[in-house]
Amino acid sequence: MTILSTLGQNELLIRQFSSLQGQIQTIQTQVATNQKSQVYGDLGSQTSLDINLHNQATQIDDYTKSINQLQVRAGIVDTSLSIIHDTTVSVQNLAFNSPQVGANRVNLVSQAKAAIDQINQRLQSQVDGRNLFSGTLTQSQTMVPQSTLLPTVQAAVAAAITANAALSPPGNVAAAVQTAVATVFATTSNFYTGGPPTPPTQIGPSLSIDTSITGGDPAFQTILQGLYTIASLPQPVSPPVVAPNLSEADFDAIAANSGTVISQGLSSLETLTEKNGNNEAVMTKESSQHAATLTVLQTQINNIENVDLAGASTKLTQLQTQLNASYRITASLSSLNLADFLK
């Protein structure tokens, strides 16, 4: 049997008291914070699992934030595409009204110019200072203003009319004008000043989506080609017609051809609208899956980190009782003298 000295007994009691006090303080902190520990290291064998779960939750949360940003942009893109469609259809319908009359021809040119401005305005849409249709150049102006581009197109149309009239016999004026305007729009920088499409965005562990639609897309190129052709037309004159003037028949033929071009652009625009809508559906589905995954991950994290308050309260009471009993025993022993031991 090993007998401790009085000093050794005191040191042992102090260590026991300190241990009990430390355990009590730890449990009190756990009850107050509802967490087992403030640092990973105190979680023992579950430390690695807890860190991994937190990393997964952070990644899923980042995907969710990306989706939220993309959904806001996709909503504005959808609105812009809808307005562009409706604006363009109105001019297309006017262009197909043949034969035209004087007032209608004036109105057609006016509506084409208004539609161009409306389309350029929608393609300049922004979210948080980011131009949505400018591709990678998010701070760049998206489209060349009508005030800059229209004179170029008008000059090309006038040149085409004059060159066609010089032929013997004169060629097809409507075809010549359409070719001239198509040549202007064949160079993307003539009407679009943004950058290339942005790369796809990752919204899940193995899922990326392409949300980029630029003002340089062939759909807008074709629509604007038709609209600018109409907007550049001079009002027809009565015979004899001298180039670069137009006859009423040539004006109406060019307008009808432009309506066909616009119709082709609208078909491509529908494809862009469908793409954007599909992206919205994918993002909504993926966002719901991320929310469910985060719930599962957070439950697992809570199971590791959070305290069973009922169990902790019971253990706290037991430790406090044990400590109080130790204090009473120690106090009783310290009051004994040699006579008490010899009795």
Image (cartoon, helix red, strand yellow):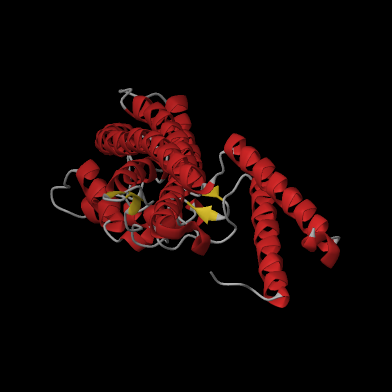
Please identify the residue farthest to the front as the structure is shown.
343
Q: Percent position (x, y) of residue 97?
A: 33, 22
For this view, does 85 lie left or right of residue 261? right
Residue found at x 50% / y 38%: 114
Query: Residue at position x 40%, y 24% from top?
Result: 101
- Image x and y of residue 243, in percent: 32, 50
Up the image or down, 155 lies above or below 93; here it is below
Q: Nearer the viewer, residue 116 or 304?
A: 304
Q: Is residue 113 left or right of residue 32?
A: left
Image location (x, y in percent) of residue 181: 30, 51
Taking the spot 47% from the left edge, 47% from the top edge, the residue there is: 304
Determine which quarter of the picture holds residue 87.
top left
Residue 139 appears in the figure: no
Along the line of sight, the residue nearer the viewer: 295 or 271: 295
Q: Quadrant of the C terminus?
A: bottom right
Judging depth in this view, the residue of 210 and 54 nearest the camera is 54
On the question of residue 131 being in view, the answer is yes
Q: Position of residue 173 (x, y in %)?
A: 23, 44
**Which residue is at the front of the view, 59 or 170?**
59
